[in-house]
Image (cartoon, grey):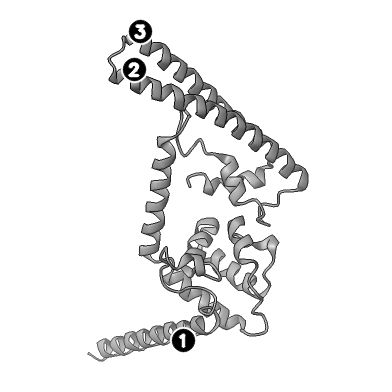
Amino acid sequence: MRLNKSILIISTLIAISSFSNASSAEKLLQKHCASCHLLSTPTPDIIPSMNAPAMDGVLFHLKEALGSDREVKSFIVDYVQEPKLLKTLCESNKVKKFGLMPSLKDTITIKELESISDYIIQNYPTKEFVDMLNNKRKNSRLKSLKSSPFLINRDSMPHLTKILMKNWDKGTLGLNKSQKEALLRVRQDTLLGVRKIKKELNTLEAEVVAMTVDGEELTLIASKVESISKLKKEATMLQIKCLQDSTNILDDRQIELLLPFWDL
């Protein structure tokens, strides 16, 4: 009986301690982070006026890029003390929009940083935010598929130049000047080629729809469909060439860093 009481007392003390630590960390979060980072789930009407990425977004991308909670915590503790462009994991457009965060080195202790890190890793991103972002990505995929000129539309065949643009200025990616110039040439050639093909495809597809509605002979429609197939084959080969040319410009480390983003 005494043993059961002891276990109960210890369990209660642990629970109280955990609650106290969480409460303390939440207060630290409010004190040091809430003035810039939104702590609730962002809504479309709030996003344009935000001064920094929402905490949901910060933790979503950190966990996506780094994987383990230990690595996320280590990154947060280091970055908050000494923010640098070379360390950033944010998408390039976010860095341009918000800039680098100010250092909190002189205003917060390591212990407090670790406490905040543990709390936000445990509580962010919220399920609501993850569901919202996944739905947005799904809708974007469906939208792009509707107007896609490619024969192959799979996550394993990514539009690599789009991914590169999102990560263009990340210090961790470390693109040098000659790489950027070469990648931009590949991107420009691919975009020009695909746009030309897409314009021709739109015209041909509209003609096929009209001919079908008007009851034209199948042989006449077939010639148009064959032309569409040839154009889609050409666009697909441009996509494959772009992927191969881009990866040839990157080194193995850079490719490995980009791999987690291929399913976006």
Three-letter code for the amino acid on which mark 1 is drawn: Ser
As displayed, is residue 47 above or below residue 80? above
Give the Cα distance between marks 2 and 3.
Answer: 11 Å
Residue 219: assigned label: 3
Say if residue 212 shows up in the picture: yes
Please indicate whether residue 20 sits to the left or right of residue 63 in the image: left
User: Dot 2 lies on which element?
Assistant: helix
As displayed, is residue 83 above or below residue 105? above
Give the Cα distance between marks 2 and 1.
Answer: 70 Å
Say if residue 257 shows up in the picture: no
Q: How many marks?
A: 3
Nearest to N terminus: mark 2 or mark 3: 2
Nearest to N terminus: mark 3 or mark 1: 1
Residue topped by disc 1: 24
| Foreground label between 3 and 1 | 3
Give the Cα distance between marks 3 and 1.
Answer: 75 Å
Please indicate whether residue 199 sits to the left or right of residue 107 in the image: left
Three-letter code for the amino acid on which mark 2 is drawn: Met
Residue topped by disc 2: 211
Neighbor class of circle 1 (other Cα within 10 Å; few <14, some 14-19, many 20+) is: some
